[in-house]
Amino acid sequence: MSRAVRALIERLGERRPRVALVLGSGLGALVDAVEAPLRIPYAEIPGFPVSAVSGHADEIVAGRLAGVEVLILSGRIHYYESGDAAAMRPMLEALKAVGVEILVLTNAAGSVNAAIAPGEVMLIDDHINFSGRNPLISEPSDARFTGMTTAYDAALRETLAAAAADVGETLHRGVYMWFSGPSFETPAEIRMARVLGADAVGMSTVPETILARFLGLRVVAASVVTNYGAGMTGDELSHTETKDVAPRGGAKLARILAAALPEIAT
Ligand code: HPA
C-alpha cells in the first residue's frame, strides 16, 4: 500500500465513499453543501500534487452530499502547471485504492457554441484531446491501450440529464476539447474548435478522464461555461472572469449534482 493510500485511509477512518468529485476553478462552493465535512489538505497526503492556481482550495473534503457519502477533491493540478499530463495519477490511484468507483469531474470552460452562454452548464458527452499529450505515455502495461469509446458513462450521463430536468435547470450537452493552456485560445483556434466538433474548450478534465478509465473508474463530467471563446465577443479573456462567473454556473451544477447523487450512488 502506498504512503498516500495509507495516509488517506488513516484520515478517512471508517468512511469509504464510492463517489468522488473533482471541482474546477471557482467551483469550490459545492463544498459548502457537504454535511459533517472532514477537511484534509492535499499537503498532508504524501504525493498529492498541490495546485498553485488561484481559485483552487487544494483540499479533500469527505462528508455527505444529498445523503450520499462523497469525497470531494477541491482543486486539481493541471497539465500546464508542470508539463506532466499524468500529474493527477497519484490522486486518482489513491481514490481507486480506497474504494472509489465513480468519478464526477467538473471544470470551468469557454463556450464555442453560441447556444451555450456563460453561466450555463454543459454535460460532457465526449471529448477531443487537442493537446497532443496523453497521461498514459510511458505506462508500460498493455492497460495503456485504454478504450475511450464509452469514456463518459452513458447511464451516469442520463442520470444527470434526468436530475437536471427534475430540478428545472438547463443542462446542455456537448463535446469538450482539451487545449493545454495556460494561455487562452486565439479566435482562429476557437473557429477551428467549432469546425472540428467542439462545443466547449478548456484546460483540464481530459487527462483525468483518460487516467480514470485506465484505472477502471466510471466517469461523468460537466463544464460550467464562464465565457464565450476568444473572438466570439469583443472582450479579452481572463482568469479573473473565470473565477467570477464560475460560481453562477457552479450553483446550477450543485443543484443538478445534489439531485443526481442518490441515483448515481445506487
Ligand atoms: N478557454 C480555455 N479554458 C477556459 C476558458 C476558455 O475560454 N474559460 C475557462 N476555462
Image (tube, helix red, strand yellow):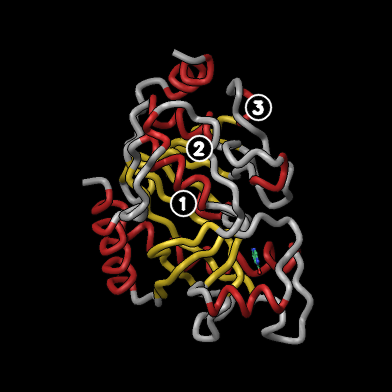
Answer few, some or many: residues within 10 Å of disc 2's Cα (few below 14, many 20 plus, some between 14 and 19): some
Q: Name the amino acid, label 1.
A: Leu
The residue at which mark 2 appears reads as 136
Residue 88: x, y in percent?
56, 37
The residue at which mark 1 appears reads as 105
**Which residue is at the front of the view, 75 or 216?**
216
Instruction: Looking at the image, tell me whether mark 1 or mark 2 is earlier in sequence order.
Output: 1
**Which residue is at the front of the view, 255 or 209?**
209
Q: CA distance from mark 3 to mark 2?
A: 25 Å
Q: Name the amino acid, label 2.
A: Leu
Contact between marks 1 and 3 (CB within 8 A): the answer is no
For residue 64, say whether it is visible. no
What kind of element bears circle 2? Answer: loop
Task: Give left or right: position of 190 versus 95.
Answer: right
Residue at image x 50%, y 45%? Answer: 208
What kind of element bears circle 3? Answer: helix
Residue at image x 79%, y 76%? Answer: 236
Residue at image x 54%, y 37%? Answer: 137
